[in-house]
Image (cartoon, rainbow, N blue to C red):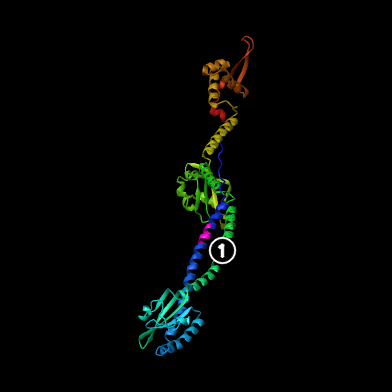
């Protein structure tokens, strides 16, 4: 039974969708805010217009004087209608203290009582708000009309709420158009940003980046070679465990510290000047080889990397090899072949001086050495003229060899220390 997995969205698609959602949300919030502000602006503009018209009517001498006429509406109605049409308002109604209309857009309504409560303006205060009257729901302003300090009537000015709504929706179309344009521009910008980010991260997906970071961390901290990176300001941005071990500190303490505060003078010199081949530097008991890319490029400060490799063991091996080479060279200068020791040669020489005309077996028995090893030393003495070899025919079969020092009168051959000075 096989299990199928839904294909995962690529980073580019995720970025595009995320940024598109953000652009859409921000644009929607901005559009709603703009709509609310626009609605308030339209209503405030109409209220300001209605307030100006109503106060103008309430303060007109012709209107105030007409209240004393036998037929006030004969004077007030033409004035109110002229002002209403010039101000593009729905109605201008003037009424007396009993609420009887002296003007109305519908002349048949003149002489009737107003349809809404006039108590606020009759009390000397200004009323603004929304009410439903004979012409429908309107935004309206009502102001008192004074004569010699007394309220004699009211001037009510209004505009249909639907008219303000129509104007708002007319403006809203422009707002929505601007919102759609902003969303489209945001989508194109999001696509460009997503493509740019993809290029910057070499087209890698998030899981690939995570795996790469984990592998880098594992590799970096598992290296035996110390790695320290320093930015152009001289601050350590990365240090692995090996580098911290060489500097006898902790990697977390190195990261973020200034290079000049934690690195010695020699390492700072290598870091700043650059060293491709590597320079030996002593760090406590360790001998490390330091290499660097250099902290300057054409005089400008740049990021630099310092690499430290522990050569302590190799240094010890080289010292031991050099010591062995010195011993071999010393032996070669003394004429000793490989495998022969000066101390043993001295013992063989002294034994031969005390036992002249002895065979290798006899000298070996005296020194408790093997016949083969003893014979090598005796042959060397004979080949260098320090001893004389003679054949012994008294043995059965092949003649044997016997050795004696070259000049018995001089006593034992020279000691190894004397021999080496020749």
Residue placed most toward the observer, 296 or 175? 175
Q: How many marks?
A: 1
Q: As drawn, which residue projects farthest toward the right?
A: 398
Identify the residue shown where x is 50% and y is 43%: 221
Q: Is residue 278 above or below residue 403?
A: below
Quadrant including the C terminus: top right
| Quadrant containing the N terminus in the rendered view | top right
Q: Position of residue 318 (x, y in %)?
A: 55, 37
In the image, 250 versus 214, the foreground residue is 214
Q: Position of residue 134 (x, y in %)?
A: 45, 76
Residue 24 colored magenta? yes
Chief secondary structure of the magenta portion? helix
Residue where numbered disc 1 is placed: 180
User: SS at mark 1?
Assistant: helix
- Position of 311 relative to 109 (above/below): above
Q: Residue furthest front?
A: 108
Where residue 370 appears, as percent x and y from the top left, is 55, 18
Q: Is residue 232 above or below residue 388?
A: below
**Magenta stretch?**
21-26
At a point 55% along the width and 28% down the height, the residue shown is 418
- Front residue of 53/176: it is 53
């Amino acid at each position: 039974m096989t299990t199928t997995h839904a294909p995962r969205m690529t980073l580019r698609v995720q970025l595009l969708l995320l940024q598109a959602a953000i652009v859409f949300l921000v644009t929607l919030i901005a559009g709603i805010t703009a709509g609310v502000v626009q609605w308030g602006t339209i209503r405030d503009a109409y209220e300001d217009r209605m307030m100006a018209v109503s106060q103008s009517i309430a303060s007109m001498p012709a209107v105030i004087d007409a209240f004393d006429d036998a037929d006030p509406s004969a004077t007030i109605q033409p004035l109110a209608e002229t002002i209403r049409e010039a101000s593009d308002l729905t109605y201008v109604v003037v009424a007396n203290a009993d609420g009887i209309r002296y003007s109305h857009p519908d002349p048949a309504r003149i002489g009737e009582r107003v349809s809404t409560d006039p108590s606020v303006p009759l009390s000397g205060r200004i009323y603004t708000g929304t009410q439903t009257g004979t012409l429908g729901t309107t935004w309206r302003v009502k102001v008192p009309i004074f004569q010699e300090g007394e309220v004699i009537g009211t001037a009510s000015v209004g505009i249909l709420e639907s008219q303000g709504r129509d104007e708002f929706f007319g403006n809203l179309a422009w707002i929505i158009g601007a919102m759609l344009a902003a969303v489209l521009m945001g989508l194109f910008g999001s696509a460009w940003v997503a493509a740019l980010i993809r290029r910057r991260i070499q087209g890698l997906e998030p899981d690939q980046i995570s795996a790469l970071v984990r592998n880098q961390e594992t590799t970096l901290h598992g290296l035996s070679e110390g790695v320290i990176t320093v930015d152009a300001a001289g601050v350590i941005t990365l240090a692995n465990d090996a580098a911290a071990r060489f500097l006898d500190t902790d990697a977390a303490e190195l990261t973020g510290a200034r290079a000049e505060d934690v690195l010695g003078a020699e390492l700072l010199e290598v870091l700043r000047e650059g060293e491709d081949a590597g320079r030996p530097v002593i760090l406590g008991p360790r001998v490390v080889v330091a290499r660097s890319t250099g902290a300057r490029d054409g005089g400008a400060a740049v990021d630099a990397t310092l690499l430290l490799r522990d050569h302590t063991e190799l240094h010890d091996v080289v010292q031991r090899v050099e010591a062995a080479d010195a011993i071999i060279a010393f032996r070669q200068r003394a004429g000793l072949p490989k495998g022969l020791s000066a101390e043993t040669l001295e013992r063989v020489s002294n034994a031969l001086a005390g036992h002249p005309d002895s065979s290798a077996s006899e000298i070996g028995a005296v020194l408790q050495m093997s016949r083969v090893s003893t014979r090598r030393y005796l042959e060397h003495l004979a080949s260098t003229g320090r001893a004389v070899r003679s054949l012994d025919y008294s043995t059965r079969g092949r003649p044997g060899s016997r050795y004696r020092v070259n000049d018995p009168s001089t006593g034992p051959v020279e000691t190894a220390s004397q021999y080496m000075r020749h």
